[in-house]
Amino acid sequence: EVQLVESGGDVVQAGGSLRLSCAASGFTSTDYTIGWFRQAPGKEREGIASIDLSHRNRYYADSVKGRFTISNNNAKNTVYLQMNSLKPEDTAVYYCAANVKGWGTSVNPIGYGYWGQGTQVTVSS
């Protein structure tokens, strides 16, 4: 059974940093993509970063480019999202998800069949 478990959400002041983790289990290979999504109250879910574990390609949304970094540790089956220079508008529930359809670094949520439970990130001004 595939499972994704996020951790690392917290309350942080603007300008601060957090690192989110997404621990994956149940996969039989690394032929999949992990995406990070976020959803703020009253807003649509936004795909902000992804990593294609087979081809090592990465994607960042303009809203986080230059501030967030996605990385992975295959030995730990974990994908990280390092978030620096956080802003109040980064406040949201952050989810990781897995795409096993071979869509590369796409962050179209339709392609993601496995989702974690989410972790809250709150950035105070």
Image (cartoon, rainbow, N blue to C red):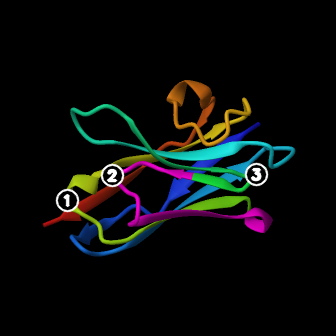
Determine whether label 1 and label 2 are within 8 Å by CB: no
Mark 2 neighbour density, 10 Å: few (under 14) some (14–19) many (20 or more): few
* Image-quadrant location for residue 103: top right
Q: Which residue is mark 2?
A: 63
In what element is the residue under mark 2?
loop
Q: Residue at x 79, y 67 (%)?
A: 75
Position in image of residue 3 (x %, y %): 67, 43
Q: CA distance from mark 1 to mark 3?
A: 33 Å
Which residue was labeled with disc 1? Answer: 88
Q: Nearer the viewer, residue 98 or 54?
A: 54
Which image quarter holds the N terminus? top right
Residue in view at x 67 percent, y 60 percent: 78
User: Residue 106 magenta-drawn?
Assistant: no
N-term mark: 2 or 3: 3
Does residue 2 sit above or below 70 in this rendering? Answer: above
Q: Which residues are magenta?
A: 59-76
Which residue shows up at 37% across the image and 50% down it?
62
Question: In screen coordinates, is 64 left or right of 5?
Answer: left
Of the two numbered discs 1 and 2 on the same chain, state the one appearing first in sequence: 2
41 left or right of 77 in image: left
> Is 64 colored magenta in this rendering?
yes
Name the image quarter holding residue 22. Answer: bottom right
Q: Is residue 105 above or below residue 101?
A: below
- Please rate how many residues cluster around mark 3, counting C-alpha atoms within 10 Å: few if below 14, some from 14 to 19, many from 20: few
* Residue type marked 1: Pro
Label ID, residue 1: none
Image spot of residue 67 (x, y percent):
38, 66
Category of crowding for the residue at label 1, using alpha-carbon neighbours closer than 10 angstroms: few (below 14), some (14–19), many (at least 20)? some
- CA–CA distance between discs 1 and 2? 13 Å
Q: Position of residue 116 (x, y in %)?
A: 55, 42
Pointer 3 residue? 55
